[in-house]
Amino acid sequence: MVCGAHAQSGLNLPWNQPAGWSRGDVDGIDVISLPLPYSNRDGLLRRGWTFAWFALRSLRLALTESYDVAFATSTPLTAALPGLAARWLRGKPFVFEVRDLWPELPRALGVRNPLLLGAMSFLEWAAYRGADACIGLSPGIVVGIQRRSPPGRQVTLIPNGCDLDLFHPRRRAPLALPGITTGDFVAGFTGAHGPANGLDALLDVARELRRRGDTRVKLAFIGDGKEKDRLKALATADGLTNCLFFDPVPKQQLGAITASLDCGLMVLKNVPAFYDGTSPNKFFDYAAAGIPIVNNYPGWLAAMIKQAGAGVVVPPGEPAAFADALQALAADPERCRRAGVAARTLAEQRFARGDLSAQFVDVLQGVAQKLS
Protein backbone atom coordinates (compact mmCIF):
# COMPACT_ATOMS: atom_id res chain seq x y z
CA MET A 1 0.00 0.00 0.00
CA VAL A 2 1.35 3.39 -1.03
CA CYS A 3 -0.02 6.48 0.72
CA GLY A 4 0.92 10.04 1.54
CA ALA A 5 2.12 11.38 4.89
CA HIS A 6 -1.14 10.64 6.67
CA ALA A 7 -1.45 10.36 10.44
CA GLN A 8 -3.81 7.41 9.99
CA SER A 9 -1.36 5.34 7.94
CA GLY A 10 -0.31 3.61 11.16
CA LEU A 11 3.37 4.24 10.48
CA ASN A 12 5.37 5.99 13.15
CA LEU A 13 8.78 5.58 11.61
CA PRO A 14 11.38 8.19 10.62
CA TRP A 15 11.77 9.00 6.95
CA ASN A 16 14.28 6.84 5.10
CA GLN A 17 16.30 9.65 3.54
CA PRO A 18 18.02 7.65 0.74
CA ALA A 19 14.74 6.09 -0.36
CA GLY A 20 12.67 9.20 0.29
CA TRP A 21 9.86 7.44 2.12
CA SER A 22 8.88 5.60 5.29
CA ARG A 23 8.15 1.88 5.07
CA GLY A 24 6.90 -0.64 7.60
CA ASP A 25 4.39 -3.31 8.54
CA VAL A 26 0.92 -2.22 9.67
CA ASP A 27 -1.37 -5.11 10.62
CA GLY A 28 0.39 -7.36 8.12
CA ILE A 29 0.27 -4.79 5.31
CA ASP A 30 3.48 -3.50 3.72
CA VAL A 31 2.89 0.27 3.85
CA ILE A 32 5.00 2.87 2.05
CA SER A 33 4.26 6.42 3.18
CA LEU A 34 5.55 9.24 0.98
CA PRO A 35 6.46 12.59 2.60
CA LEU A 36 3.57 14.41 0.94
CA PRO A 37 1.18 15.90 3.52
CA TYR A 38 -2.25 16.88 2.26
CA SER A 39 -4.99 19.00 3.79
CA ASN A 40 -8.47 20.07 2.75
CA ARG A 41 -7.23 23.57 3.53
CA ASP A 42 -4.73 23.46 0.64
CA GLY A 43 -5.39 25.69 -2.35
CA LEU A 44 -5.86 24.47 -5.92
CA LEU A 45 -2.18 24.84 -6.91
CA ARG A 46 -0.93 23.16 -3.75
CA ARG A 47 -3.35 20.28 -4.22
CA GLY A 48 -2.39 19.90 -7.87
CA TRP A 49 1.30 19.76 -7.00
CA THR A 50 0.72 17.18 -4.27
CA PHE A 51 -1.45 15.00 -6.51
CA ALA A 52 1.01 15.12 -9.41
CA TRP A 53 4.06 14.45 -7.25
CA PHE A 54 2.34 11.55 -5.48
CA ALA A 55 1.45 10.00 -8.84
CA LEU A 56 5.02 10.32 -10.13
CA ARG A 57 6.55 8.88 -6.96
CA SER A 58 4.02 6.02 -6.98
CA LEU A 59 4.70 5.37 -10.66
CA ARG A 60 8.30 4.49 -9.84
CA LEU A 61 7.09 1.99 -7.24
CA ALA A 62 4.55 0.52 -9.66
CA LEU A 63 7.38 -0.19 -12.10
CA THR A 64 9.78 -1.74 -9.57
CA GLU A 65 7.86 -3.43 -6.73
CA SER A 66 6.68 -7.05 -6.74
CA TYR A 67 2.88 -7.48 -6.73
CA ASP A 68 0.07 -9.33 -8.51
CA VAL A 69 -2.58 -6.66 -9.16
CA ALA A 70 -2.24 -2.88 -9.33
CA PHE A 71 -5.13 -1.16 -7.55
CA ALA A 72 -5.58 2.61 -7.56
CA THR A 73 -8.26 4.71 -5.94
CA SER A 74 -9.28 8.27 -6.74
CA THR A 75 -9.49 11.07 -5.80
CA PRO A 76 -7.27 12.39 -7.16
CA LEU A 77 -7.69 11.22 -10.71
CA THR A 78 -3.90 11.24 -11.13
CA ALA A 79 -3.79 8.14 -8.89
CA ALA A 80 -4.64 6.22 -12.08
CA LEU A 81 -1.22 7.00 -13.62
CA PRO A 82 0.78 4.37 -11.68
CA GLY A 83 -1.93 1.79 -12.45
CA LEU A 84 -1.82 2.61 -16.15
CA ALA A 85 1.99 2.35 -16.12
CA ALA A 86 1.74 -1.05 -14.42
CA ARG A 87 -0.77 -2.24 -17.04
CA TRP A 88 0.94 -0.89 -20.14
CA LEU A 89 4.60 -1.34 -19.23
CA ARG A 90 4.54 -4.45 -17.03
CA GLY A 91 1.36 -6.20 -18.13
CA LYS A 92 -0.02 -6.17 -14.59
CA PRO A 93 -3.79 -6.39 -14.04
CA PHE A 94 -5.14 -2.96 -13.11
CA VAL A 95 -8.31 -2.22 -11.10
CA PHE A 96 -9.39 1.41 -10.73
CA GLU A 97 -11.72 2.56 -7.96
CA VAL A 98 -13.54 5.83 -8.67
CA ARG A 99 -14.60 7.84 -5.62
CA ASP A 100 -15.59 11.01 -7.51
CA LEU A 101 -16.28 11.73 -11.17
CA TRP A 102 -13.66 14.05 -12.65
CA PRO A 103 -13.94 16.50 -14.38
CA GLU A 104 -17.68 16.52 -13.74
CA LEU A 105 -17.49 17.51 -10.07
CA PRO A 106 -14.72 20.15 -10.41
CA ARG A 107 -16.67 21.69 -13.28
CA ALA A 108 -19.86 21.70 -11.21
CA LEU A 109 -17.97 23.38 -8.35
CA GLY A 110 -16.80 26.22 -10.57
CA VAL A 111 -13.47 25.13 -12.11
CA ARG A 112 -13.37 26.82 -15.53
CA ASN A 113 -9.77 26.41 -16.75
CA PRO A 114 -10.20 24.65 -20.13
CA LEU A 115 -6.69 23.17 -20.09
CA LEU A 116 -7.17 21.68 -16.62
CA LEU A 117 -10.62 20.33 -17.44
CA GLY A 118 -9.34 18.93 -20.73
CA ALA A 119 -6.45 17.16 -19.01
CA MET A 120 -8.84 15.69 -16.44
CA SER A 121 -11.20 14.50 -19.16
CA PHE A 122 -8.39 12.81 -21.10
CA LEU A 123 -6.99 11.09 -18.01
CA GLU A 124 -10.47 9.93 -17.03
CA TRP A 125 -10.98 8.44 -20.50
CA ALA A 126 -7.56 6.77 -20.43
CA ALA A 127 -8.06 5.35 -16.93
CA TYR A 128 -11.45 3.81 -17.68
CA ARG A 129 -10.21 2.29 -20.91
CA GLY A 130 -6.86 1.17 -19.54
CA ALA A 131 -8.22 -0.55 -16.44
CA ASP A 132 -9.19 -4.21 -16.58
CA ALA A 133 -12.07 -3.48 -14.18
CA CYS A 134 -13.51 -0.45 -12.43
CA ILE A 135 -15.25 -0.03 -9.09
CA GLY A 136 -17.67 2.86 -8.52
CA LEU A 137 -18.74 4.04 -5.08
CA SER A 138 -22.23 5.18 -6.07
CA PRO A 139 -24.81 4.45 -8.80
CA GLY A 140 -24.08 7.76 -10.53
CA ILE A 141 -20.35 7.04 -10.57
CA VAL A 142 -20.98 3.62 -12.12
CA VAL A 143 -23.08 5.21 -14.87
CA GLY A 144 -20.38 7.82 -15.47
CA ILE A 145 -17.70 5.13 -15.82
CA GLN A 146 -19.84 3.08 -18.18
CA ARG A 147 -20.53 6.11 -20.34
CA ARG A 148 -16.81 6.55 -21.13
CA SER A 149 -15.70 2.91 -21.06
CA PRO A 150 -15.41 0.45 -23.94
CA PRO A 151 -18.21 -2.13 -24.34
CA GLY A 152 -17.85 -5.05 -21.96
CA ARG A 153 -15.79 -3.21 -19.37
CA GLN A 154 -16.48 -4.66 -15.92
CA VAL A 155 -17.85 -1.95 -13.64
CA THR A 156 -18.95 -2.94 -10.12
CA LEU A 157 -20.83 -0.87 -7.54
CA ILE A 158 -19.14 -1.18 -4.14
CA PRO A 159 -19.94 1.81 -1.91
CA ASN A 160 -18.10 2.84 1.22
CA GLY A 161 -18.83 0.47 4.06
CA CYS A 162 -19.86 0.72 7.69
CA ASP A 163 -17.48 -0.08 10.51
CA LEU A 164 -20.11 -1.82 12.59
CA ASP A 165 -17.90 -2.22 15.66
CA LEU A 166 -16.20 1.17 15.84
CA PHE A 167 -19.46 3.04 15.16
CA HIS A 168 -21.97 1.24 17.35
CA PRO A 169 -25.04 2.34 19.36
CA ARG A 170 -23.61 0.68 22.48
CA ARG A 171 -20.93 3.40 22.57
CA ARG A 172 -23.54 6.07 23.23
CA ALA A 173 -22.83 8.17 26.32
CA PRO A 174 -23.43 11.75 27.50
CA LEU A 175 -21.47 14.08 25.23
CA ALA A 176 -18.52 15.59 27.05
CA LEU A 177 -18.05 18.50 24.65
CA PRO A 178 -17.74 22.18 25.62
CA GLY A 179 -20.95 24.18 25.22
CA ILE A 180 -23.26 21.17 25.46
CA THR A 181 -25.47 20.79 28.52
CA THR A 182 -27.97 18.22 29.73
CA GLY A 183 -31.17 18.41 27.71
CA ASP A 184 -29.58 19.76 24.53
CA PHE A 185 -30.48 18.09 21.25
CA VAL A 186 -27.16 17.80 19.41
CA ALA A 187 -27.17 17.52 15.62
CA GLY A 188 -23.64 16.78 14.44
CA PHE A 189 -21.74 17.18 11.20
CA THR A 190 -18.56 15.09 11.12
CA GLY A 191 -16.19 15.47 8.21
CA ALA A 192 -14.45 17.89 5.87
CA HIS A 193 -15.43 21.55 6.00
CA GLY A 194 -14.81 22.28 2.32
CA PRO A 195 -16.58 24.23 -0.44
CA ALA A 196 -18.36 21.09 -1.65
CA ASN A 197 -20.01 20.55 1.72
CA GLY A 198 -22.10 23.72 1.54
CA LEU A 199 -22.03 24.24 5.31
CA ASP A 200 -23.38 27.77 5.02
CA ALA A 201 -26.73 25.99 4.84
CA LEU A 202 -26.30 24.96 8.48
CA LEU A 203 -25.59 28.54 9.52
CA ASP A 204 -28.89 29.48 7.85
CA VAL A 205 -30.60 26.73 9.87
CA ALA A 206 -28.99 28.07 13.06
CA ARG A 207 -30.30 31.55 12.27
CA GLU A 208 -33.79 30.14 11.73
CA LEU A 209 -33.67 28.27 15.05
CA ARG A 210 -32.56 31.44 16.81
CA ARG A 211 -35.40 33.39 15.17
CA ARG A 212 -37.80 30.84 16.61
CA GLY A 213 -36.26 31.21 20.06
CA ASP A 214 -35.03 27.60 20.12
CA THR A 215 -32.06 27.27 22.47
CA ARG A 216 -32.18 23.50 22.81
CA VAL A 217 -31.03 22.38 19.36
CA LYS A 218 -27.26 22.70 18.96
CA LEU A 219 -25.30 22.20 15.73
CA ALA A 220 -21.89 20.58 16.31
CA PHE A 221 -19.26 20.87 13.57
CA ILE A 222 -16.51 18.25 14.04
CA GLY A 223 -13.65 18.22 11.54
CA ASP A 224 -11.47 20.57 9.54
CA GLY A 225 -11.17 22.15 6.12
CA LYS A 226 -10.50 25.36 4.25
CA GLU A 227 -13.99 26.72 5.03
CA LYS A 228 -13.88 26.14 8.77
CA ASP A 229 -12.24 29.43 9.81
CA ARG A 230 -14.68 31.42 7.65
CA LEU A 231 -17.68 29.54 9.05
CA LYS A 232 -16.52 30.06 12.64
CA ALA A 233 -15.99 33.77 11.98
CA LEU A 234 -19.47 34.12 10.48
CA ALA A 235 -21.08 32.25 13.37
CA THR A 236 -19.26 34.43 15.89
CA ALA A 237 -20.11 37.67 14.07
CA ASP A 238 -23.79 36.68 13.87
CA GLY A 239 -23.91 35.58 17.50
CA LEU A 240 -24.89 32.01 16.59
CA THR A 241 -24.23 30.44 19.97
CA ASN A 242 -26.09 27.32 18.79
CA CYS A 243 -23.18 26.55 16.44
CA LEU A 244 -20.29 24.74 18.15
CA PHE A 245 -17.02 24.02 16.35
CA PHE A 246 -14.63 21.25 17.37
CA ASP A 247 -11.28 20.03 16.09
CA PRO A 248 -11.06 16.74 14.19
CA VAL A 249 -10.62 13.70 16.43
CA PRO A 250 -9.08 10.23 15.87
CA LYS A 251 -11.42 7.66 14.38
CA GLN A 252 -11.61 5.64 17.60
CA GLN A 253 -12.79 8.68 19.51
CA LEU A 254 -15.09 9.77 16.69
CA GLY A 255 -16.96 6.46 16.87
CA ALA A 256 -18.08 7.14 20.42
CA ILE A 257 -18.89 10.80 19.73
CA THR A 258 -20.98 9.93 16.66
CA ALA A 259 -22.99 7.34 18.57
CA SER A 260 -23.65 9.97 21.24
CA LEU A 261 -25.11 12.55 18.84
CA ASP A 262 -28.88 12.89 18.68
CA CYS A 263 -28.78 12.97 14.88
CA GLY A 264 -26.24 13.15 12.07
CA LEU A 265 -26.24 15.86 9.40
CA MET A 266 -25.75 14.92 5.75
CA VAL A 267 -25.10 18.26 4.04
CA LEU A 268 -23.73 18.99 0.57
CA LYS A 269 -23.77 21.96 -1.76
CA ASN A 270 -26.83 21.83 -4.00
CA VAL A 271 -25.07 20.51 -7.10
CA PRO A 272 -26.95 17.93 -9.23
CA ALA A 273 -23.69 16.06 -9.89
CA PHE A 274 -23.65 15.19 -6.18
CA TYR A 275 -27.10 13.60 -6.10
CA ASP A 276 -26.06 10.16 -7.32
CA GLY A 277 -22.34 10.78 -7.73
CA THR A 278 -21.10 10.74 -4.13
CA SER A 279 -20.70 8.17 -1.35
CA PRO A 280 -19.91 10.24 1.78
CA ASN A 281 -18.26 8.40 4.67
CA LYS A 282 -20.33 10.30 7.20
CA PHE A 283 -23.56 8.65 5.99
CA PHE A 284 -22.13 5.21 6.74
CA ASP A 285 -20.75 6.33 10.10
CA TYR A 286 -24.12 7.77 11.16
CA ALA A 287 -25.96 4.63 10.04
CA ALA A 288 -23.56 2.29 11.85
CA ALA A 289 -23.82 4.42 15.00
CA GLY A 290 -27.60 4.01 14.93
CA ILE A 291 -28.57 7.69 14.92
CA PRO A 292 -31.21 9.43 12.75
CA ILE A 293 -29.84 11.06 9.59
CA VAL A 294 -31.02 14.44 8.34
CA ASN A 295 -30.15 14.91 4.67
CA ASN A 296 -30.49 18.11 2.58
CA TYR A 297 -29.97 16.98 -1.01
CA PRO A 298 -31.76 14.50 -3.33
CA GLY A 299 -30.24 11.33 -4.73
CA TRP A 300 -29.63 7.67 -4.00
CA LEU A 301 -28.83 8.10 -0.31
CA ALA A 302 -31.84 10.37 0.25
CA ALA A 303 -34.07 7.73 -1.33
CA MET A 304 -32.55 5.07 0.91
CA ILE A 305 -33.06 7.15 4.06
CA LYS A 306 -36.72 7.66 3.14
CA GLN A 307 -37.35 4.02 2.25
CA ALA A 308 -35.70 2.69 5.41
CA GLY A 309 -37.21 5.32 7.70
CA ALA A 310 -33.68 6.11 8.88
CA GLY A 311 -34.15 9.85 9.20
CA VAL A 312 -35.49 12.91 7.43
CA VAL A 313 -34.84 14.30 3.94
CA VAL A 314 -35.36 18.03 3.50
CA PRO A 315 -35.28 20.08 0.27
CA PRO A 316 -32.02 21.90 -0.49
CA GLY A 317 -31.92 25.61 0.22
CA GLU A 318 -34.85 25.60 2.67
CA PRO A 319 -33.56 26.37 6.19
CA ALA A 320 -37.08 26.53 7.60
CA ALA A 321 -37.79 22.95 6.51
CA PHE A 322 -34.44 21.87 7.92
CA ALA A 323 -35.21 23.57 11.25
CA ASP A 324 -38.65 21.93 11.25
CA ALA A 325 -37.03 18.50 10.87
CA LEU A 326 -34.58 19.07 13.74
CA GLN A 327 -37.25 20.42 16.06
CA ALA A 328 -39.59 17.54 15.24
CA LEU A 329 -36.89 15.01 16.11
CA ALA A 330 -35.96 16.88 19.28
CA ALA A 331 -39.60 16.79 20.41
CA ASP A 332 -40.08 13.06 19.74
CA PRO A 333 -37.51 10.75 21.38
CA GLU A 334 -39.39 7.65 20.27
CA ARG A 335 -39.23 8.76 16.63
CA CYS A 336 -35.48 9.29 17.05
CA ARG A 337 -35.11 5.84 18.52
CA ARG A 338 -37.01 4.18 15.67
CA ALA A 339 -35.03 6.07 13.02
CA GLY A 340 -31.77 5.13 14.75
CA VAL A 341 -32.73 1.46 14.81
CA ALA A 342 -33.67 1.65 11.12
CA ALA A 343 -30.34 3.31 10.31
CA ARG A 344 -28.39 0.60 12.12
CA THR A 345 -30.42 -2.13 10.38
CA LEU A 346 -29.65 -0.50 7.02
CA ALA A 347 -25.96 -0.48 7.91
CA GLU A 348 -25.95 -4.14 8.87
CA GLN A 349 -27.99 -5.36 5.92
CA ARG A 350 -26.62 -3.24 3.08
CA PHE A 351 -23.24 -1.81 4.05
CA ALA A 352 -21.43 -4.23 6.35
CA ARG A 353 -17.75 -3.77 5.59
CA GLY A 354 -17.09 -7.52 5.69
CA ASP A 355 -19.66 -8.20 2.96
CA LEU A 356 -18.41 -5.35 0.77
CA SER A 357 -14.81 -6.48 1.28
CA ALA A 358 -15.74 -9.92 -0.05
CA GLN A 359 -17.18 -8.31 -3.20
CA PHE A 360 -14.01 -6.25 -3.53
CA VAL A 361 -11.80 -9.34 -3.27
CA ASP A 362 -13.93 -11.10 -5.89
CA VAL A 363 -13.22 -8.26 -8.35
CA LEU A 364 -9.46 -8.36 -7.71
CA GLN A 365 -9.22 -12.15 -7.89
CA GLY A 366 -11.40 -12.29 -10.98
CA VAL A 367 -9.15 -9.84 -12.83
CA ALA A 368 -5.97 -11.61 -11.68
CA GLN A 369 -7.27 -15.02 -12.77
CA LYS A 370 -8.54 -13.75 -16.09
CA LEU A 371 -5.14 -12.34 -17.03
CA SER A 372 -2.94 -15.04 -15.46
Image (cartoon, helix red, strand yellow):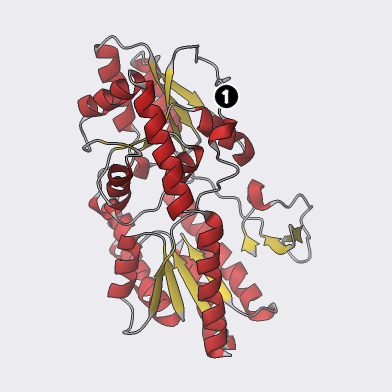
Left or right of 294? Residue 256 is right
Residue 88 vs residue 273, the one in the foreground: 273
Q: Residue at x 55, y 46 (%)?
A: 164
For badge 1, the amino acid type reads Ala
The residue at the point 60 percent across, 42 percent down is 166
Toward the bottom, the furthest residue is 372
329 left or right of 97 in image: left
Seen from the viewer's position, the closer of residues 331 and 63 is: 331
Q: Is residue 136 above or below residue 14?
A: below
Does the rendering let one see residue 93? no
Percent across and percent down for residue 75 are 46, 59
- In the image, residue 220 sits, relative to residue 103, either above or below, namely above
Circle 1 residue: 173
The residue located at (55%, 40%) in the rendering is 167
Say which of 301 and 56 sits in front.
301
* Position of residue 202 measured from the top left corner of the image (x, y, whole percent): 33, 29
Is residue 208 shown above or below 347? above
The reply to whether residue 75 is in sight is: yes
Figure quadrant of residue 107:
bottom left
Give the quarter of the figure containing the N terminus.
Answer: bottom right
Residue at the (59%, 78%) spot, across then down: 69
- Measured as percent of width and height from the top left, residue 10 is found at 70, 51
